[in-house]
Image (tube, helix red, strand yellow):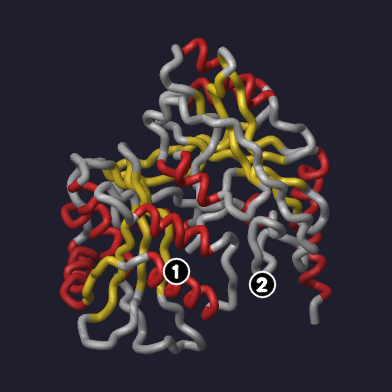
């Protein structure tokens, strides 16, 4: 399951390739020229305390590979003191869209946390003011960031609309999932724990499983799976890992994987980053029918790991009714948060979005 905004889905060229036309009006356009190399001043001296894992330099360095990635900078005393990175993609009707790299689910301005609040405010405003007006932008930002209010003010000041995106959180001190479930769902989860083996996967095995499930559904990834593989591989290295992959399968020998999730974390949050499950084709799968509670069991195991690290577990955005039903009604996550979403569309893109539903309906009527 890939977590993408409608704007990201609409920007099909350069950033990703897909076989269907979700978020568009027709076949993908010919990709634009390969991105130019990004010449980035060093931000090595910046203090990055409190940054979400998706905004940390090591993550962005991998997530942006192969994309038309651009980075704005501000300086103080001749040294880079702030940056704002984004991908630029062009859809099939010529709309230029800007957003963080697909595998980075949170973005926005980053400034040196060693500076005082007034200095940081000025730098953030200078960064946001540099965003070109001929590109439609969308940034999903962390509402718990130390500069969240400064970022919000800066975006609004230059004409961005503020919206929200729901995410669900279980803090380290909150009761665990089992204690919150109804007796019916508690029984389901306990049976899943009895029937399924949960193990950790390395990057190669997870991406192979993820890719095979996309192919079984007749889809391709919106973003580079090679980049995702490298993020997992690097995140699993060393004595202080930042990524873990959980997978579940029946305990009988030779059984296929039913589902897998990849989680990434920083010093404060533990995110449910990627999720995939074995697909049914025409009522059949490559093996027996996948266990209906495999995903719930994996989420439960991940929340336990997050608790062992004293981190809050974040589902990393819940934008569909199915996801909200899972996290709110079934798993009963105790905290609902609203991420900050900042959008500024060009006039052409506003018109495109206004006309898009009618054009889709017309195309559907013309199909045999």
Q: Mark 2 points at which residue?
A: 19
Residue 101: x and y in percent read: 57, 48
- Judged left or right of residue 204, residue 93 is right
The nearer-to-camera label among 2 and 1 is: 1
Q: Name the residue under label 1.
A: 207
Above or below, 247 relative to 137: below
Q: Quadrant of residue 166?
A: top left
Q: Which of marks 2 and 1 is nearer the N terminus?
A: 2
- Judged left or right of residue 166, residue 86 is right
Element type at marker 2? Answer: loop
Above or below, 129 relative to 296: above
Residue 246: x and y in percent read: 30, 64
Element type at marker 1? Answer: helix
Above or below, 163 relative to 193: above
- The residue at 46%/25% (across/down) is 45
Measure how far apart labels 2 and 1 are at the Cα level.
19 Å
Above or below, 236 relative to 114: below
Residue 311: x and y in percent read: 26, 42
Can the viewer see residue 137 in this picture? yes
- The residue at 40%/31% (across/down) is 144
Residue 147: x and y in percent read: 46, 23
Q: Residues within 10 Å of mark 2 (few under 14, many from 20)?
A: few
Residue 148 numbered tag:
none
């Amino acid at each position: 399951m890939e977590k993408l905004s409608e704007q990201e889905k609409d920007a099909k060229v350069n950033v990703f390739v897909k076989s269907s036309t979700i978020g568009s009006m027709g076949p993908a356009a010919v990709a634009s020229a390969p991105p130019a190399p990004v010449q980035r001043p060093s931000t090595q001296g910046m203090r990055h305390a409190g940054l979400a894992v998706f905004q940390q330099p090591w993550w962005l360095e991998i997530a942006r590979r192969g994309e038309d990635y651009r980075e704005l900078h501000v300086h103080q005393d001749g040294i880079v003191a702030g940056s704002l990175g984004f991908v630029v993609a062009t859809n099939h009707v010529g709309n230029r869209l800007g957003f963080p790299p697909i595998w980075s689910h949170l973005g926005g301005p980053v400034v040196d946390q060693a500076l005082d609040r007034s200095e940081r405010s000025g730098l953030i405003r200078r960064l946001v003011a540099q965003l070109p007006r001929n590109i439609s932008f969308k940034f999903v930002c962390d509402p718990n960031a130390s500069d969240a209010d400064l970022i919000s003010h800066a975006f609004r000041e230059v004409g961005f609309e503020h919206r929200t995106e729901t995410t669900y959180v279980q803090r380290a001190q909150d009761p665990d999932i089992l204690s919150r479930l109804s007796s019916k769902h508690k029984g389901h989860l306990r049976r899943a724990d009895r029937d399924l083996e949960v193990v950790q996967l390395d990057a190669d095995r997870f991406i192979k499983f993820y890719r095979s499930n996309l192919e079984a559904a007749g889809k391709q990834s919106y973003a580079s799976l090679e980049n995702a593989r490298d993020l997992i591989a690097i995140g699993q290295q060393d004595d202080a890992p930042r990524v873990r992959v959980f997978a579940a399968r029946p305990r009988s020998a030779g059984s296929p994987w039913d589902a897998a999730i990849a989680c990434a974390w920083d010093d404060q949050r533990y995110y449910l980053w990627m999720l995939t499950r074995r697909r049914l084709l025409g009522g059949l799968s490559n093996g027996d029918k996948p266990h209906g509670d495999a995903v719930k069991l994996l989420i439960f195991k991940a929340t336990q790991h997050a608790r062992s690290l004293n981190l809050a577990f974040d589902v990393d955005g819940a934008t569909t009714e199915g996801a909200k039903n899972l996290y709110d009604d079934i798993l009963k996550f105790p905290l609902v948060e609203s991420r900050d979403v900042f959008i500024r569309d060009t006039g052409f893109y506003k018109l495109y979005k206004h006309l898009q539903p009618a054009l889709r309906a017309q195309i559907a009527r013309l199909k045999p």
